[in-house]
Image (cartoon, coloured by chain):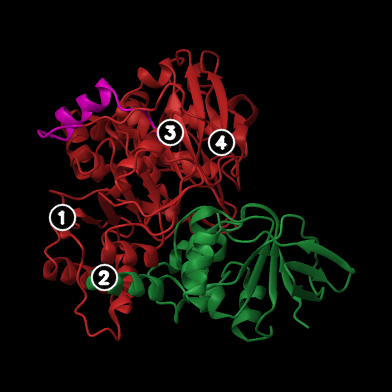
Amino acid sequence: MGMTIVEKTLAKATGQKIVKAGDVLEPKVDLAMSHENGALVINQFNEVFKGTGIEPKIWNPEKIAIIFDHRVPAESSKTATNQKKIRDFVRKNKIKKFHDIRADEGGICHQILPEYGYVRPGYVVVGTDSHTTTHGALGSFAFGIGATEMASVWTLGRVLNVEVPHTIKVIVKGKFKNNVTAKDLVLYLIGKISAQGANFKVIEYHGETIKNMSTSGRLVICNMAVEAGATSGIVPPDKETERYLREVAGVTDDINFILPDDDAIYSETIEINVNELEPQIACPHTVDNVKPISDMKGTKIDQIVIGSCTNGRLDDIEIAANILKGKKVAKGVRMLVFPASWNIYKESMKKGYLESLSNAGAIIMNPGCGCCLGVHQGALGDEEVALSTTNRNFKGRMGNPKAEVYLCSPAVAAISAVYGEITNPLKGGN
Amino acid sequence: MPKVIYKFGDDISTDVVYPGRYMATVLPIETPQYAFADYVDFNKNLNDKNYPEGSFIVADNNFGCGSSREQAASCIKGHGINVIAKDFARIFMQNAINLGLNLIVCPDIEANVDDDIEIKDNLVINKTTGKSFGIEPLPPARQAIIDAGGLIPYTRKKMLEQLKK
Protein backbone atom coordinates (compact mmCIF):
# COMPACT_ATOMS: atom_id res chain seq x y z
CA MET A 1 0.00 0.00 0.00
CA GLY A 2 1.39 3.37 -1.00
CA MET A 3 2.01 6.27 1.33
CA THR A 4 1.65 10.04 1.08
CA ILE A 5 4.63 12.30 1.82
CA VAL A 6 3.43 12.89 5.36
CA GLU A 7 2.89 9.18 6.02
CA LYS A 8 6.40 8.42 4.74
CA THR A 9 7.89 11.26 6.77
CA LEU A 10 6.19 10.02 9.92
CA ALA A 11 7.29 6.45 9.19
CA LYS A 12 10.87 7.69 9.08
CA ALA A 13 10.42 9.80 12.23
CA THR A 14 9.13 6.79 14.18
CA GLY A 15 11.35 4.09 12.65
CA GLN A 16 8.44 2.19 11.14
CA LYS A 17 8.04 0.71 7.68
CA ILE A 18 4.42 1.58 7.13
CA VAL A 19 2.28 4.32 8.57
CA LYS A 20 -1.27 5.10 7.58
CA ALA A 21 -3.78 7.85 8.22
CA GLY A 22 -5.42 7.42 11.61
CA ASP A 23 -2.39 5.81 13.30
CA VAL A 24 -1.31 7.47 16.53
CA LEU A 25 2.41 8.13 16.77
CA GLU A 26 5.08 9.95 18.73
CA PRO A 27 7.34 11.26 15.94
CA LYS A 28 10.80 12.67 16.61
CA VAL A 29 11.10 16.37 15.90
CA ASP A 30 13.80 17.80 13.60
CA LEU A 31 13.06 21.45 14.28
CA ALA A 32 10.99 23.15 17.01
CA MET A 33 10.32 26.84 16.41
CA SER A 34 8.90 29.52 18.69
CA HIS A 35 8.69 33.31 18.65
CA GLU A 36 7.72 35.72 21.44
CA ASN A 37 5.31 33.10 22.80
CA GLY A 38 8.49 31.29 23.84
CA ALA A 39 7.89 33.15 27.11
CA LEU A 40 4.86 30.93 27.77
CA VAL A 41 6.75 27.84 26.54
CA ILE A 42 9.51 28.53 29.08
CA ASN A 43 6.91 28.84 31.84
CA GLN A 44 5.23 25.53 30.88
CA PHE A 45 8.62 23.84 30.36
CA ASN A 46 9.60 24.69 33.94
CA GLU A 47 6.21 23.37 35.12
CA VAL A 48 6.99 19.95 33.60
CA PHE A 49 10.00 19.59 35.91
CA LYS A 50 8.30 21.04 38.99
CA GLY A 51 8.39 18.72 42.00
CA THR A 52 10.67 16.18 40.30
CA GLY A 53 13.92 17.48 41.74
CA ILE A 54 15.32 17.40 38.19
CA GLU A 55 16.92 20.49 36.66
CA PRO A 56 14.92 21.53 33.53
CA LYS A 57 16.89 20.37 30.48
CA ILE A 58 16.14 20.81 26.77
CA TRP A 59 16.40 17.60 24.77
CA ASN A 60 18.56 19.19 22.06
CA PRO A 61 19.31 22.93 21.81
CA GLU A 62 20.54 22.46 18.20
CA LYS A 63 16.98 21.68 17.12
CA ILE A 64 15.29 24.67 18.68
CA ALA A 65 14.80 27.93 16.80
CA ILE A 66 13.52 31.14 18.36
CA ILE A 67 12.79 34.15 16.21
CA PHE A 68 11.47 37.49 17.46
CA ASP A 69 8.96 38.80 14.94
CA HIS A 70 5.49 39.33 16.38
CA ARG A 71 6.18 42.56 18.21
CA VAL A 72 9.47 44.05 17.04
CA PRO A 73 10.78 46.31 18.41
CA ALA A 74 8.73 45.71 21.57
CA GLU A 75 5.48 47.71 21.61
CA SER A 76 5.14 47.53 25.40
CA SER A 77 7.20 46.97 28.52
CA LYS A 78 5.40 43.65 28.96
CA THR A 79 6.62 42.40 25.57
CA ALA A 80 10.11 43.71 26.22
CA THR A 81 10.16 41.79 29.50
CA ASN A 82 9.01 38.60 27.74
CA GLN A 83 11.73 39.08 25.11
CA LYS A 84 14.32 39.63 27.84
CA LYS A 85 13.23 36.43 29.58
CA ILE A 86 13.60 34.50 26.31
CA ARG A 87 17.00 36.06 25.57
CA ASP A 88 18.25 34.94 29.00
CA PHE A 89 16.89 31.43 28.39
CA VAL A 90 18.55 31.26 24.96
CA ARG A 91 21.90 32.25 26.43
CA LYS A 92 21.66 29.83 29.34
CA ASN A 93 20.61 26.90 27.14
CA LYS A 94 23.02 27.70 24.29
CA ILE A 95 20.30 27.91 21.62
CA LYS A 96 22.10 28.96 18.44
CA LYS A 97 19.19 29.28 16.02
CA PHE A 98 18.10 32.50 17.74
CA HIS A 99 17.21 35.57 15.68
CA ASP A 100 17.03 38.72 17.75
CA ILE A 101 15.71 42.19 16.85
CA ARG A 102 18.68 43.03 14.64
CA ALA A 103 19.09 44.09 11.02
CA ASP A 104 21.80 41.50 10.42
CA GLU A 105 19.74 38.42 11.31
CA GLY A 106 16.11 39.33 11.94
CA GLY A 107 12.84 38.71 10.18
CA ILE A 108 9.60 36.77 10.30
CA CYS A 109 10.03 33.21 11.56
CA HIS A 110 8.41 31.72 8.45
CA GLN A 111 10.93 33.51 6.26
CA ILE A 112 13.98 32.96 8.49
CA LEU A 113 13.50 29.17 8.69
CA PRO A 114 13.71 28.60 4.90
CA GLU A 115 16.20 31.42 4.31
CA TYR A 116 18.72 30.00 6.78
CA GLY A 117 18.22 26.39 5.69
CA TYR A 118 16.71 25.33 9.04
CA VAL A 119 13.93 23.37 7.29
CA ARG A 120 14.57 20.56 4.84
CA PRO A 121 12.67 17.90 2.92
CA GLY A 122 11.65 15.01 5.16
CA TYR A 123 11.86 16.97 8.40
CA VAL A 124 9.19 16.95 11.08
CA VAL A 125 8.84 20.62 12.01
CA VAL A 126 6.65 22.01 14.79
CA GLY A 127 6.13 25.65 15.63
CA THR A 128 4.11 27.56 18.19
CA ASP A 129 2.49 29.39 15.32
CA SER A 130 -0.39 28.27 13.14
CA HIS A 131 1.40 29.36 9.94
CA THR A 132 4.11 26.76 10.55
CA THR A 133 2.34 25.00 7.64
CA THR A 134 4.51 27.30 5.46
CA HIS A 135 7.50 24.97 5.64
CA GLY A 136 5.77 22.22 3.71
CA ALA A 137 6.92 24.31 0.74
CA LEU A 138 10.33 22.67 1.22
CA GLY A 139 8.90 19.18 1.61
CA SER A 140 8.83 19.00 5.40
CA PHE A 141 5.84 17.97 7.48
CA ALA A 142 5.34 21.19 9.40
CA PHE A 143 2.47 22.02 11.70
CA GLY A 144 1.43 24.45 14.40
CA ILE A 145 1.17 23.50 18.07
CA GLY A 146 0.41 25.34 21.32
CA ALA A 147 2.93 26.51 23.90
CA THR A 148 2.32 23.66 26.35
CA GLU A 149 2.80 21.11 23.59
CA MET A 150 6.06 22.84 22.69
CA ALA A 151 7.17 22.56 26.32
CA SER A 152 6.56 18.83 25.96
CA VAL A 153 8.64 18.75 22.75
CA TRP A 154 11.47 20.67 24.43
CA THR A 155 11.46 18.02 27.16
CA LEU A 156 11.11 14.83 25.11
CA GLY A 157 12.16 15.69 21.54
CA ARG A 158 8.99 14.18 20.16
CA VAL A 159 5.37 15.17 19.74
CA LEU A 160 3.03 13.05 21.81
CA ASN A 161 -0.07 11.53 20.31
CA VAL A 162 0.06 12.72 16.73
CA GLU A 163 -2.81 11.26 14.78
CA VAL A 164 -1.56 10.71 11.22
CA PRO A 165 -3.68 13.04 9.10
CA HIS A 166 -5.50 12.12 5.91
CA THR A 167 -4.23 13.94 2.82
CA ILE A 168 -6.11 15.90 0.18
CA LYS A 169 -4.39 15.94 -3.20
CA VAL A 170 -4.71 19.25 -5.02
CA ILE A 171 -3.63 19.13 -8.65
CA VAL A 172 -3.04 22.52 -10.25
CA LYS A 173 -2.77 22.91 -14.01
CA GLY A 174 -2.42 25.80 -16.42
CA LYS A 175 -0.44 29.03 -16.58
CA PHE A 176 -1.20 32.14 -14.55
CA LYS A 177 -2.08 35.33 -16.37
CA ASN A 178 0.38 38.14 -15.76
CA ASN A 179 -0.08 39.60 -12.24
CA VAL A 180 -2.05 36.57 -11.09
CA THR A 181 -0.01 34.66 -8.52
CA ALA A 182 0.16 31.89 -5.93
CA LYS A 183 -1.87 34.07 -3.52
CA ASP A 184 -4.82 34.16 -5.92
CA LEU A 185 -4.61 30.38 -6.31
CA VAL A 186 -4.67 29.70 -2.58
CA LEU A 187 -7.47 32.22 -1.92
CA TYR A 188 -9.47 30.54 -4.68
CA LEU A 189 -8.83 27.11 -3.14
CA ILE A 190 -9.88 28.27 0.35
CA GLY A 191 -13.04 29.84 -1.08
CA LYS A 192 -13.79 26.59 -2.87
CA ILE A 193 -13.30 24.16 0.05
CA SER A 194 -14.14 26.60 2.92
CA ALA A 195 -12.31 27.51 6.13
CA GLN A 196 -13.09 24.02 7.45
CA GLY A 197 -12.57 22.11 4.20
CA ALA A 198 -9.23 20.61 5.18
CA ASN A 199 -9.70 20.39 8.98
CA PHE A 200 -7.33 17.79 10.48
CA LYS A 201 -5.99 17.00 6.97
CA VAL A 202 -2.89 17.77 4.92
CA ILE A 203 -3.02 19.44 1.52
CA GLU A 204 -0.46 17.92 -0.87
CA TYR A 205 0.05 20.13 -3.93
CA HIS A 206 0.73 18.61 -7.34
CA GLY A 207 0.57 19.51 -11.03
CA GLU A 208 2.51 21.45 -13.64
CA THR A 209 1.65 24.84 -12.13
CA ILE A 210 3.24 23.82 -8.83
CA LYS A 211 6.28 22.31 -10.61
CA ASN A 212 6.81 25.64 -12.38
CA MET A 213 6.24 27.67 -9.22
CA SER A 214 9.17 29.24 -7.35
CA THR A 215 9.77 28.37 -3.70
CA SER A 216 8.47 31.83 -2.85
CA GLY A 217 5.07 30.94 -4.34
CA ARG A 218 5.06 27.50 -2.74
CA LEU A 219 5.63 29.15 0.64
CA VAL A 220 2.44 31.18 0.01
CA ILE A 221 0.21 28.20 -0.81
CA CYS A 222 1.50 26.17 2.14
CA ASN A 223 1.34 29.17 4.49
CA MET A 224 -2.37 29.65 3.84
CA ALA A 225 -3.28 25.95 3.90
CA VAL A 226 -4.10 26.50 7.57
CA GLU A 227 -6.82 28.96 6.55
CA ALA A 228 -8.69 25.96 5.11
CA GLY A 229 -8.13 24.24 8.47
CA ALA A 230 -5.27 22.06 7.20
CA THR A 231 -2.74 20.57 9.61
CA SER A 232 -0.15 21.30 6.94
CA GLY A 233 0.38 22.09 3.28
CA ILE A 234 3.15 20.25 1.46
CA VAL A 235 4.84 20.32 -1.95
CA PRO A 236 6.82 17.27 -3.17
CA PRO A 237 10.45 18.44 -3.18
CA ASP A 238 12.14 18.76 -6.58
CA LYS A 239 14.94 20.59 -8.41
CA GLU A 240 13.51 23.95 -7.41
CA THR A 241 13.58 22.90 -3.73
CA GLU A 242 17.22 21.92 -4.10
CA ARG A 243 18.01 25.14 -5.99
CA TYR A 244 16.46 27.23 -3.20
CA LEU A 245 18.26 25.36 -0.43
CA ARG A 246 21.63 25.55 -2.19
CA GLU A 247 21.50 29.03 -3.73
CA VAL A 248 19.40 31.00 -1.26
CA ALA A 249 19.81 29.11 2.02
CA GLY A 250 23.44 28.13 1.36
CA VAL A 251 22.92 24.51 2.40
CA THR A 252 25.98 22.36 1.61
CA ASP A 253 25.17 19.03 3.28
CA ASP A 254 23.02 16.22 1.89
CA ILE A 255 19.39 16.89 1.03
CA ASN A 256 17.15 13.82 1.06
CA PHE A 257 13.82 13.96 -0.73
CA ILE A 258 10.75 12.13 0.49
CA LEU A 259 8.22 11.77 -2.32
CA PRO A 260 4.72 10.30 -2.28
CA ASP A 261 4.15 6.81 -3.69
CA ASP A 262 2.23 6.60 -6.97
CA ASP A 263 -0.41 4.49 -5.24
CA ALA A 264 -0.68 6.67 -2.13
CA ILE A 265 -4.18 6.93 -0.73
CA TYR A 266 -5.80 10.36 -0.67
CA SER A 267 -9.08 11.24 1.05
CA GLU A 268 -9.99 13.52 -1.84
CA THR A 269 -8.56 14.89 -5.09
CA ILE A 270 -9.25 18.44 -6.26
CA GLU A 271 -8.25 19.78 -9.68
CA ILE A 272 -7.82 23.45 -10.43
CA ASN A 273 -6.95 25.10 -13.74
CA VAL A 274 -5.45 28.57 -13.38
CA ASN A 275 -5.54 29.61 -17.07
CA GLU A 276 -8.59 31.80 -16.59
CA LEU A 277 -8.12 32.57 -12.88
CA GLU A 278 -8.59 36.25 -12.10
CA PRO A 279 -7.23 37.97 -8.97
CA GLN A 280 -9.13 36.91 -5.85
CA ILE A 281 -10.22 38.90 -2.80
CA ALA A 282 -11.04 37.44 0.64
CA CYS A 283 -13.75 39.70 2.05
CA PRO A 284 -14.52 40.40 5.73
CA HIS A 285 -14.66 38.63 8.15
CA THR A 286 -13.58 35.11 7.11
CA VAL A 287 -10.76 33.99 4.83
CA ASP A 288 -13.12 31.73 2.85
CA ASN A 289 -15.39 34.62 1.90
CA VAL A 290 -13.53 34.80 -1.41
CA LYS A 291 -14.76 36.68 -4.49
CA PRO A 292 -13.23 37.34 -7.90
CA ILE A 293 -11.91 40.89 -8.09
CA SER A 294 -14.52 41.89 -10.67
CA ASP A 295 -17.19 41.59 -7.94
CA MET A 296 -15.28 43.85 -5.55
CA LYS A 297 -13.97 46.56 -7.88
CA GLY A 298 -14.38 50.06 -6.51
CA THR A 299 -14.35 49.20 -2.77
CA LYS A 300 -12.74 52.23 -1.07
CA ILE A 301 -9.55 51.61 0.91
CA ASP A 302 -7.94 53.53 3.80
CA GLN A 303 -4.85 51.41 4.40
CA ILE A 304 -2.82 49.15 2.12
CA VAL A 305 -0.49 46.58 3.68
CA ILE A 306 2.17 44.60 1.84
CA GLY A 307 4.08 42.10 3.95
CA SER A 308 3.71 39.20 6.40
CA CYS A 309 4.76 35.56 6.36
CA THR A 310 2.46 35.21 3.35
CA ASN A 311 3.56 37.97 0.98
CA GLY A 312 6.55 39.98 2.18
CA ARG A 313 9.15 38.26 0.01
CA LEU A 314 11.45 39.76 -2.61
CA ASP A 315 9.22 38.91 -5.60
CA ASP A 316 6.20 40.40 -3.78
CA ILE A 317 8.04 43.65 -3.16
CA GLU A 318 9.33 43.62 -6.74
CA ILE A 319 5.79 43.36 -8.14
CA ALA A 320 4.60 46.21 -5.93
CA ALA A 321 7.60 48.39 -6.75
CA ASN A 322 7.20 47.86 -10.50
CA ILE A 323 3.54 48.83 -10.34
CA LEU A 324 4.15 51.90 -8.15
CA LYS A 325 7.31 53.17 -9.84
CA GLY A 326 6.68 56.74 -10.97
CA LYS A 327 3.15 56.70 -9.56
CA LYS A 328 1.64 57.94 -6.30
CA VAL A 329 -0.35 56.29 -3.56
CA ALA A 330 -3.80 57.97 -3.69
CA LYS A 331 -4.35 60.92 -1.35
CA GLY A 332 -5.90 59.89 1.95
CA VAL A 333 -4.56 56.34 1.65
CA ARG A 334 -1.77 55.02 3.87
CA MET A 335 0.48 52.31 2.49
CA LEU A 336 2.73 50.19 4.72
CA VAL A 337 5.36 47.76 3.42
CA PHE A 338 6.91 45.15 5.74
CA PRO A 339 9.68 43.11 4.07
CA ALA A 340 9.61 39.59 5.55
CA SER A 341 13.26 39.63 6.61
CA TRP A 342 16.21 41.99 6.79
CA ASN A 343 17.91 40.12 3.96
CA ILE A 344 14.86 40.85 1.81
CA TYR A 345 14.84 44.45 3.02
CA LYS A 346 18.46 44.97 1.99
CA GLU A 347 18.05 43.19 -1.35
CA SER A 348 14.98 45.35 -2.06
CA MET A 349 17.01 48.42 -1.18
CA LYS A 350 19.85 47.41 -3.52
CA LYS A 351 17.45 46.80 -6.39
CA GLY A 352 15.79 50.18 -5.90
CA TYR A 353 12.39 48.75 -4.95
CA LEU A 354 12.28 50.54 -1.61
CA GLU A 355 13.06 53.84 -3.34
CA SER A 356 10.24 53.36 -5.87
CA LEU A 357 7.81 52.47 -3.10
CA SER A 358 8.77 55.29 -0.75
CA ASN A 359 8.76 57.85 -3.58
CA ALA A 360 5.20 56.75 -4.28
CA GLY A 361 4.34 57.53 -0.65
CA ALA A 362 4.55 54.06 0.91
CA ILE A 363 6.16 53.76 4.33
CA ILE A 364 8.85 51.10 4.54
CA MET A 365 8.49 49.45 7.94
CA ASN A 366 10.98 47.21 9.72
CA PRO A 367 10.69 43.48 8.96
CA GLY A 368 8.32 41.63 11.26
CA CYS A 369 4.67 40.65 11.55
CA GLY A 370 3.75 44.34 11.77
CA CYS A 371 0.07 45.19 11.91
CA CYS A 372 -1.13 41.75 10.71
CA LEU A 373 -2.11 40.59 14.17
CA GLY A 374 -3.38 43.91 15.45
CA VAL A 375 -0.80 44.71 18.09
CA HIS A 376 1.03 47.73 16.68
CA GLN A 377 2.47 49.45 13.58
CA GLY A 378 -0.70 50.41 11.75
CA ALA A 379 -3.99 50.22 13.64
CA LEU A 380 -7.24 50.93 11.80
CA GLY A 381 -9.81 53.53 12.82
CA ASP A 382 -13.51 52.77 13.28
CA GLU A 383 -15.21 51.92 9.96
CA GLU A 384 -11.86 52.02 8.15
CA VAL A 385 -11.01 49.49 5.45
CA ALA A 386 -7.67 47.78 4.89
CA LEU A 387 -6.56 45.88 1.80
CA SER A 388 -3.73 43.60 2.78
CA THR A 389 -1.48 40.84 1.45
CA THR A 390 -1.56 39.16 4.87
CA ASN A 391 -3.43 35.94 5.68
CA ARG A 392 -6.31 36.71 8.05
CA ASN A 393 -9.29 39.05 8.02
CA PHE A 394 -11.15 37.94 11.15
CA LYS A 395 -13.14 40.56 13.03
CA GLY A 396 -10.68 42.60 15.06
CA ARG A 397 -7.64 41.02 13.41
CA MET A 398 -5.89 44.34 12.72
CA GLY A 399 -6.75 45.59 16.17
CA ASN A 400 -10.19 47.13 15.64
CA PRO A 401 -13.40 45.07 15.54
CA LYS A 402 -15.15 48.05 13.92
CA ALA A 403 -12.81 47.96 10.90
CA GLU A 404 -12.72 45.69 7.86
CA VAL A 405 -9.82 43.78 6.30
CA TYR A 406 -9.77 42.48 2.70
CA LEU A 407 -7.00 40.08 1.62
CA CYS A 408 -5.33 40.04 -1.80
CA SER A 409 -2.09 39.54 -3.75
CA PRO A 410 0.73 42.11 -3.84
CA ALA A 411 -0.21 43.14 -7.41
CA VAL A 412 -3.78 43.94 -6.38
CA ALA A 413 -2.59 45.78 -3.26
CA ALA A 414 -0.13 47.92 -5.24
CA ILE A 415 -2.46 48.97 -8.08
CA SER A 416 -5.30 49.55 -5.59
CA ALA A 417 -3.00 51.91 -3.66
CA VAL A 418 -2.79 54.12 -6.75
CA TYR A 419 -6.57 54.40 -7.14
CA GLY A 420 -7.56 54.25 -3.45
CA GLU A 421 -10.02 51.47 -4.22
CA ILE A 422 -9.90 47.78 -5.11
CA THR A 423 -8.53 47.72 -8.66
CA ASN A 424 -7.83 44.90 -11.10
CA PRO A 425 -4.14 44.76 -12.07
CA LEU A 426 -5.06 42.85 -15.25
CA LYS A 427 -6.89 45.90 -16.55
CA GLY A 428 -3.93 48.17 -15.71
CA GLY A 429 -6.10 50.37 -13.54
CA ASN A 430 -9.56 51.90 -13.92
CA MET B 1 -28.75 23.63 36.26
CA PRO B 2 -25.98 25.10 34.03
CA LYS B 3 -27.19 27.32 31.21
CA VAL B 4 -26.04 28.41 27.79
CA ILE B 5 -24.50 31.85 28.31
CA TYR B 6 -23.50 32.63 24.73
CA LYS B 7 -24.31 31.27 21.30
CA PHE B 8 -21.82 31.62 18.42
CA GLY B 9 -22.02 30.66 14.73
CA ASP B 10 -19.34 29.11 12.48
CA ASP B 11 -15.62 29.90 12.33
CA ILE B 12 -15.11 31.72 15.64
CA SER B 13 -11.40 32.51 15.46
CA THR B 14 -8.92 32.72 18.31
CA ASP B 15 -8.67 36.44 17.41
CA VAL B 16 -12.27 36.71 18.61
CA VAL B 17 -11.67 34.55 21.70
CA TYR B 18 -8.45 36.32 22.69
CA PRO B 19 -7.60 39.42 20.60
CA GLY B 20 -4.00 39.72 19.37
CA ARG B 21 -3.39 42.97 21.20
CA TYR B 22 -3.42 41.10 24.54
CA MET B 23 -0.98 38.41 23.42
CA ALA B 24 1.87 39.79 25.52
CA THR B 25 -0.15 38.48 28.47
CA VAL B 26 0.69 34.78 28.50
CA LEU B 27 0.24 33.24 31.94
CA PRO B 28 -2.95 31.17 32.36
CA ILE B 29 -3.77 33.00 35.62
CA GLU B 30 -3.67 36.37 33.83
CA THR B 31 -5.43 35.61 30.52
CA PRO B 32 -9.11 35.19 31.61
CA GLN B 33 -9.65 38.96 31.97
CA TYR B 34 -9.31 39.35 28.17
CA ALA B 35 -11.59 36.48 27.12
CA PHE B 36 -13.82 37.72 24.27
CA ALA B 37 -12.54 41.25 24.94
CA ASP B 38 -14.19 42.69 21.82
CA TYR B 39 -17.60 41.37 22.96
CA VAL B 40 -17.60 44.07 25.59
CA ASP B 41 -20.76 43.07 27.51
CA PHE B 42 -19.95 39.35 27.45
CA ASN B 43 -16.42 40.06 28.64
CA LYS B 44 -17.74 42.25 31.46
CA ASN B 45 -20.22 39.59 32.58
CA LEU B 46 -17.45 37.00 32.61
CA ASN B 47 -15.14 39.25 34.63
CA ASP B 48 -17.95 40.25 37.03
CA LYS B 49 -18.51 36.52 37.62
CA ASN B 50 -22.15 36.76 36.55
CA TYR B 51 -22.09 33.20 35.19
CA PRO B 52 -21.88 30.17 37.47
CA GLU B 53 -18.97 27.77 36.90
CA GLY B 54 -19.87 25.00 34.49
CA SER B 55 -21.95 27.29 32.24
CA PHE B 56 -21.79 26.63 28.50
CA ILE B 57 -20.72 28.49 25.39
CA VAL B 58 -22.37 26.89 22.35
CA ALA B 59 -20.97 27.26 18.83
CA ASP B 60 -21.41 25.83 15.35
CA ASN B 61 -18.51 24.53 13.23
CA ASN B 62 -14.76 25.22 13.42
CA PHE B 63 -14.65 26.97 16.80
CA GLY B 64 -11.12 28.20 17.58
CA CYS B 65 -9.84 28.48 14.01
CA GLY B 66 -6.83 30.64 13.19
CA SER B 67 -3.90 31.47 15.42
CA SER B 68 -2.35 28.79 17.65
CA ARG B 69 -2.33 31.13 20.66
CA GLU B 70 -2.89 29.03 23.73
CA GLN B 71 -4.35 32.01 25.58
CA ALA B 72 -7.61 31.30 23.72
CA ALA B 73 -7.96 28.04 25.65
CA SER B 74 -6.54 29.21 28.98
CA CYS B 75 -8.75 32.32 29.10
CA ILE B 76 -11.96 30.26 28.81
CA LYS B 77 -10.74 27.64 31.24
CA GLY B 78 -9.97 30.35 33.79
CA HIS B 79 -13.65 31.29 33.89
CA GLY B 80 -14.70 27.69 34.48
CA ILE B 81 -16.79 27.69 31.29
CA ASN B 82 -17.31 24.66 29.02
CA VAL B 83 -17.60 24.82 25.25
CA ILE B 84 -20.00 22.75 23.16
CA ALA B 85 -19.47 23.01 19.39
CA LYS B 86 -20.38 21.09 16.26
CA ASP B 87 -16.63 20.78 15.77
CA PHE B 88 -13.39 22.49 16.70
CA ALA B 89 -10.30 23.62 14.80
CA ARG B 90 -7.33 21.30 15.33
CA ILE B 91 -4.81 23.42 17.24
CA PHE B 92 -7.45 24.94 19.54
CA MET B 93 -8.80 21.50 20.34
CA GLN B 94 -5.34 20.17 21.14
CA ASN B 95 -4.53 23.22 23.30
CA ALA B 96 -7.79 22.78 25.22
CA ILE B 97 -7.06 19.12 25.87
CA ASN B 98 -3.50 19.91 26.89
CA LEU B 99 -4.71 22.47 29.44
CA GLY B 100 -7.75 20.54 30.64
CA LEU B 101 -10.45 22.82 29.20
CA ASN B 102 -13.65 20.84 28.81
CA LEU B 103 -14.66 20.67 25.11
CA ILE B 104 -17.74 18.83 23.97
CA VAL B 105 -17.98 17.84 20.31
CA CYS B 106 -21.66 17.62 19.51
CA PRO B 107 -22.25 17.66 15.73
CA ASP B 108 -26.04 18.19 15.93
CA ILE B 109 -26.28 20.53 18.91
CA GLU B 110 -29.28 22.86 19.00
CA ALA B 111 -29.38 25.29 21.89
CA ASN B 112 -29.98 28.96 22.57
CA VAL B 113 -28.94 31.38 25.25
CA ASP B 114 -30.53 30.60 28.64
CA ASP B 115 -31.37 26.99 27.72
CA ASP B 116 -30.68 24.55 30.56
CA ILE B 117 -28.08 21.94 29.64
CA GLU B 118 -27.28 18.61 31.20
CA ILE B 119 -24.43 16.30 30.11
CA LYS B 120 -25.27 12.67 30.73
CA ASP B 121 -24.29 9.29 29.23
CA ASN B 122 -22.54 10.76 26.18
CA LEU B 123 -25.49 13.03 25.48
CA VAL B 124 -26.06 16.75 25.64
CA ILE B 125 -29.59 17.13 26.97
CA ASN B 126 -31.26 20.43 26.30
CA LYS B 127 -33.70 20.49 29.23
CA THR B 128 -35.45 23.57 27.86
CA THR B 129 -36.37 22.03 24.50
CA GLY B 130 -36.39 18.43 25.68
CA LYS B 131 -34.07 17.35 22.87
CA SER B 132 -30.89 15.25 23.25
CA PHE B 133 -27.82 15.22 21.06
CA GLY B 134 -25.00 12.67 20.82
CA ILE B 135 -21.47 13.58 21.93
CA GLU B 136 -18.61 12.49 19.71
CA PRO B 137 -16.02 10.81 21.95
CA LEU B 138 -12.45 12.10 21.80
CA PRO B 139 -9.92 9.84 20.08
CA PRO B 140 -8.23 7.57 22.69
CA ALA B 141 -4.89 9.31 22.21
CA ARG B 142 -6.39 12.61 23.31
CA GLN B 143 -8.38 11.02 26.10
CA ALA B 144 -5.09 9.72 27.59
CA ILE B 145 -3.87 13.30 28.04
CA ILE B 146 -7.12 14.29 29.74
CA ASP B 147 -6.95 11.24 31.99
CA ALA B 148 -3.42 12.23 33.04
CA GLY B 149 -4.70 15.67 34.06
CA GLY B 150 -3.31 17.55 31.05
CA LEU B 151 -0.18 17.53 28.95
CA ILE B 152 2.17 18.79 31.66
CA PRO B 153 1.64 15.83 34.03
CA TYR B 154 1.48 13.51 30.99
CA THR B 155 4.86 14.77 29.76
CA ARG B 156 6.31 14.62 33.28
CA LYS B 157 5.30 10.96 33.50
CA LYS B 158 6.85 10.19 30.08
CA MET B 159 10.06 12.01 31.02
CA LEU B 160 10.43 10.08 34.28
CA GLU B 161 9.82 6.80 32.42
CA GLN B 162 12.48 7.77 29.89
CA LEU B 163 15.00 8.55 32.63
CA LYS B 164 14.47 5.12 34.21
CA LYS B 165 15.37 3.34 30.97
- Image quadrant containing the C terminus of chain A: top right
* Same chain letter for marks 3 and 1: yes
Instruction: Tell me which residue sits at (56%, 73%) in the image.
Output: B76
Q: Secondary structure at mark 4?
A: helix
Instruction: Tell me which residue sits at (45%, 31%) in the image.
Output: A204
Q: Which residue is mark 2?
A: A80
- Residue B138 placement (x, y as % from top left): 59, 61
Q: Are marks 4 and 2 in contact (CB under 8 Å)?
A: no
Disc 1 residue type (three-letter): Glu
Start-end of magenta stretch: A234-255
First-in-chain label (3 vs 2):
2
Using the image as rendered, state which of residue A26 and residue A272 is in the foreground: A26
Q: What's the CA distance linking mark 1 and mark 2?
A: 25 Å
For mark 2, name the chain.
A
Q: Which residue is mark 3?
A: A221
- Residue A162 placement (x, y as % from top left): 43, 53
Q: Which residue is mark 4?
A: A190
Name the front one of labels 3 and 1: 1
> Is A150 located above or below residue A389 in the figure?
below
First-in-chain label (1 vs 2):
1
Q: Tag 1: Cα neighbours inside 10 Å, few (<14), some, or many (≥20)? A: some
For mark 4, name the chain.
A
- Residue A131 placement (x, y as % from top left): 40, 47
First-in-chain label (1 vs 4):
1
Q: Tag 2: Cα neighbours inside 10 Å, few (<14), some, or many (≥20)? A: some
Q: Which chain is in green here?
A: B
Using the image as rendered, state which of residue A301 and residue A400 is in the foreground: A400
Q: What's the CA distance linking mark 4 and mark 2?
A: 36 Å
Q: What's the CA distance linking mark 3 and mark 2?
A: 33 Å
Disc 3 residue type (three-letter): Ile
Tell me the tag on residue A62. 1
Name the front one of labels 3 and 2: 3
